[in-house]
Image (spheres, rainbow, N blue to C red):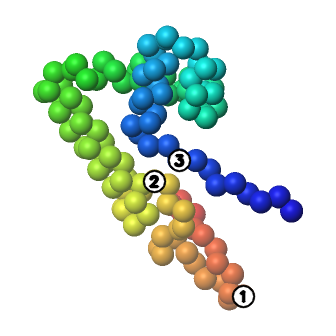
Amino acid sequence: MKTKTKRKRHSAAFKAKVGLEAVIGIKTVAQIAREYSVHPVQVSQWKGVVRQRLPELFETGSKAVDDQEKLVADLHHNNSVMHPRSPRNLFSPQPRPHQIRWEPAGRRVFRFEGS
């Protein structure tokens, strides 16, 4: 029987270091991957993340704070809508008690508006 190897988890600092080295472009992605013992696809993905998020370092403070406040407000809204016990939950996995009708044979029958 083959033993399962544990998946490597790299720190954010390691990913940033490898990604930044790939962005600089002195070595090829394959050389960087071989040097740090990671897959070349991972190096390319981390390179893309570094390229994508690098401009955030130079944004003005007020815009970054506004974006963060909007994100937090959206998350609060989504949590209240998606919470299973929320009255506004449109995607409830189970019917509400007023939607259940018991039949003599012990079968549950769901009734919805208009039934």
Relative image position of residue 86 (x, y in whole percent)? 36, 62
Q: CA distance from mark 1 to mark 2?
A: 30 Å
* Residue depicted at 44% across the width and 43% down the height: 11
Q: Earlier in the sequence, mark 2 or mark 3?
A: 3
Mark 3, secondary structure of its residue: loop
User: Which residue does the numbered mark 3 point to in the structure image?
Assistant: 9
Taking the spot 42% from the left edge, 54% from the top edge, the residue there is 82
* Mark 1 vs 3, N-terminal side: 3
Q: Which residue is mark 2?
A: 90
Structural crowding at the residue carrying mark 2, measured as other residues with C-alpha within 10 Å and reported as few (<14), some (14–19) or many (≥20): few
Q: Say if 37 sits above or below 27 in the image.
A: below
In the image, 2 versus 66, the foreground residue is 2
Q: In the figure, residue 54 lies in which quadrant?
A: top left
Side (left or right) of 93 relative to 52: right
Is disc 1 surrounded by few (<14), some (14 to 19) or many (20+) residues within 10 Å? few
- Residue 55, how many percent across, how many down? 30, 18
Residue 87 seen in the figure: yes
70 or 23, which is in the foreground?
23
Q: Is residue 54 above or below residue 3?
A: above
Find the residue positioned furthest to the top.
26
**Percent position of residue 18, x then y:** 48, 28
Sequence-earlier tag: 1 or 2: 2
Q: Amino acid at mark 2?
A: Leu
Instruction: Determine which residue is flagged by label 1.
Output: 105
The answer to whether residue 48 is visible is: no
At label 1, which amino acid type do we have? Ala
Cα separation, mark 2 vs mark 3, equals 37 Å
Name the residue type under label 3: Arg
Q: CA distance from mark 1 to mark 3?
A: 54 Å
Mark 2 element type: loop
Location of residue 102 (image quadrant): bottom right
